[in-house]
Amino acid sequence: MFTPAQIEHYNREGYVVYPDFISGDDLARLKAEIDRVSEGSTKENHDAARMEMEPNQAPDGTLVRRIYEPCTFYQPFRDFSESTALLDCVEQLFGPNLLFHYSKINMKPQNIGSVVEWHQDLSYYPLTNRDSVSILFYLDDTSEENGCLKVIPRRHTEALMSHSTEGFFRGKVTEEVDDSEAVLLEGTGGTAIFMSAMTPHASAINSSDRPRKTLILSYRAADAFPIHCGVMSDKVEAHSRLVRGKRASQARFTMTDFPIPRYEDEVASLYDLQERSRKSA
């Protein structure tokens, strides 16, 4: 459970760090499942519906960049996503009626792990209100050297920053970013970071010889309904499910307007979209 001070920090700063959220045994169990899922995959031969490989490696390279929707496909992660301790914290933020939204594992292998540019999660999946949280669980000890999360505090209550150019969504902030107040969020394995879906965040390449695996889960209030944006909305919404309380019969609207992402074509992930944007630039 959060303390009152932690909840106040989340509401004021747009994020809160919760050290040692995952116990040692649970951490080992989740990492073992990642090893099982990744075993035998190479850049040339892998299940593209379930994972994404690091692009800058040989065809027989085994470095995984992302595992898609672990909380849908793999029981240890699904059990974790529905655990009482986790849902109790989310309920403190949004109330008793909660939807699980999506999940992913960003791997960031040593000496290669891909950069993630500044973005706000809600830009990808507009909702009728902002009661959406992204939770990052460090599965390894994480520092600046191996690509820890960095955030811009107190930006989550303002309007969404621009993520588009030439009328198309680029998956990253496309206006000038003042990151002078950015905060690096380092932590040991088991640390959880609860972050508003409106908080700008990024991470650097992993330049160390240590991996940086991060499990990312998203939840939202049951009355935060998706604003349909075509096939990309369908892809995300396919994995949402009620995890506590009851479904809402009415949508709650808290914004008078919100940018709608217009995709040039279907993309696999944030990495894919941001890479295409860099190449076109």
Image (spheres, grey):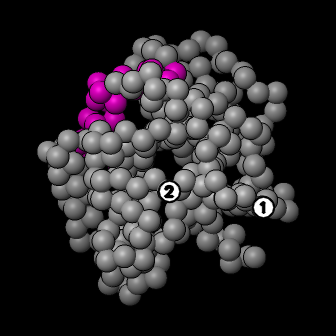
* Front residue of this view, candidates 174 and 277: 174
Residue at figure coordinates x 64%, y 30% from the top left: 130
Residue farthest to the left?
25
Residue farthest to the right?
166
The residues tagged by marks 2 and 1 sit, at their Cα atoms, a distance apart of: 19 Å
User: Which residue is under mark 2?
Assistant: 184
Residue at figure coordinates x 64%, y 53% from the top left: 181
Q: Quadrant of the N terminus?
A: top left
User: Which residue is under mark 1?
Assistant: 176
The magenta stretch is 70-94
Asked if the magenta segment contains residue 132, the reply would be: no
Percent x, y for residue 174? Answer: 76, 61
Residue at figure coordinates x 56%, y 58% from the top left: 202
What main secondary structure does the magenta stretch of the protein show?
helix
215 with respect to 225 (left or right): left
21 with respect to 280 (left or right): left
* Front residue of this view, candidates 59 and 220: 220
The count of marks equals: 2
